[in-house]
């Protein structure tokens, strides 16, 4: 996702201008071998829907790591809501905990081009592989 809406307390995340070039390069390579579905600014619901239908997933977006509660580490996506008569976009978090409760029978590979997805500052979980994915 090139842009990410504000979050709690209007927490802004920087734009990711390289996402479009990265997406084009990945698409050019992969589409030779398999159909490609692109979700430009997906919600968690849209992303999970797509994960259920495909064997490979590639995410280019912001990620967050939660040291105290690793299952709350997440990929930061977006959703819309209506405020008055205006549609606004807000952050929608695809958490490790939420994802672990979903049956993804077709899933084989996920590539995360997202900040903080492998970050773990918790000494308590040092020997565990529990990051965003």
Image (cartoon, helix red, strand yellow):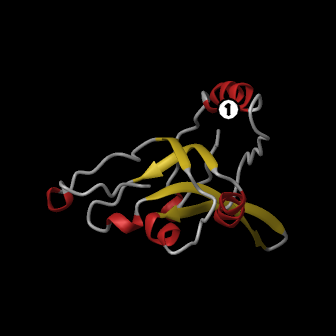
Residue at the image position 58 percent from the left and 45 percent from the top: 59
The residue that mark 1 highlights is 23
Q: Report the side of 98 relative to 44 (left or right).
A: left
Of residues 76 and 108, the one nearer the viewer is 108
- Residue 7, quarter of picture: bottom right
Of residues 11 and 125, the one nearer the viewer is 125
- Residue 45, horizontal then vertical, whole percent: 68, 67
- Residue 31, quarter of picture: top right
In this rendering, the answer to whether 11 lies above or below 85 is above
- Residue 66, horizontal then vertical, whole percent: 34, 60
- In the displayed image of the protein, which residue is found farthest to the left? 123
Q: Report the side of 101 relative to 18 (left or right).
A: left
Residue at the image position 31 percent from the left and 68 percent from the top: 69
Q: Secondary structure at mark 1?
A: helix
In this rendering, the answer to whether 3 lies above or below 33 is below
- Residue 132, quarter of picture: bottom left
Residue at the image position 77 percent from the left and 28 percent from the top: 32
Q: Quadrant of the N terminus?
A: top right
Q: Report the side of 50 relative to 70 (left or right).
A: right
Of residues 89 and 2, the one nearer the viewer is 2
Q: Quadrant of the C terminus?
A: bottom left
- Residue 54, horizontal then vertical, whole percent: 69, 54
Residue at the image position 62 percent from the left and 53 percent from the top: 5
- Residue 114, horizontal then vertical, whole percent: 49, 42
């Amino acid at each position: 996702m090139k842009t990410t809406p504000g979050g709690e307390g209007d927490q802004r995340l920087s734009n990711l201008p390289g996402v479009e070039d990265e997406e084009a390069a990945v698409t050019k390579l992969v589409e030779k071998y398999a159909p490609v579905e692109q979700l430009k600014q997906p919600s968690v619901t849209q992303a999970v829907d797509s994960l259920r239908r495909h064997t490979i997933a590639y995410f280019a977006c912001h990620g967050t790591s939660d040291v105290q509660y690793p299952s709350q580490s997440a990929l930061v996506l977006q959703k819309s809501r209506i405020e008055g008569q205006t549609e606004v976009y807000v952050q929608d978090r695809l958490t490790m905990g939420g994802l672990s409760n979903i049956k993804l029978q077709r899933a084989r590979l996920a590539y995360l081009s997202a900040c903080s997805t492998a970050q773990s500052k918790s000494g308590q979980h040092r020997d565990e592989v529990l990051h965003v994915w």
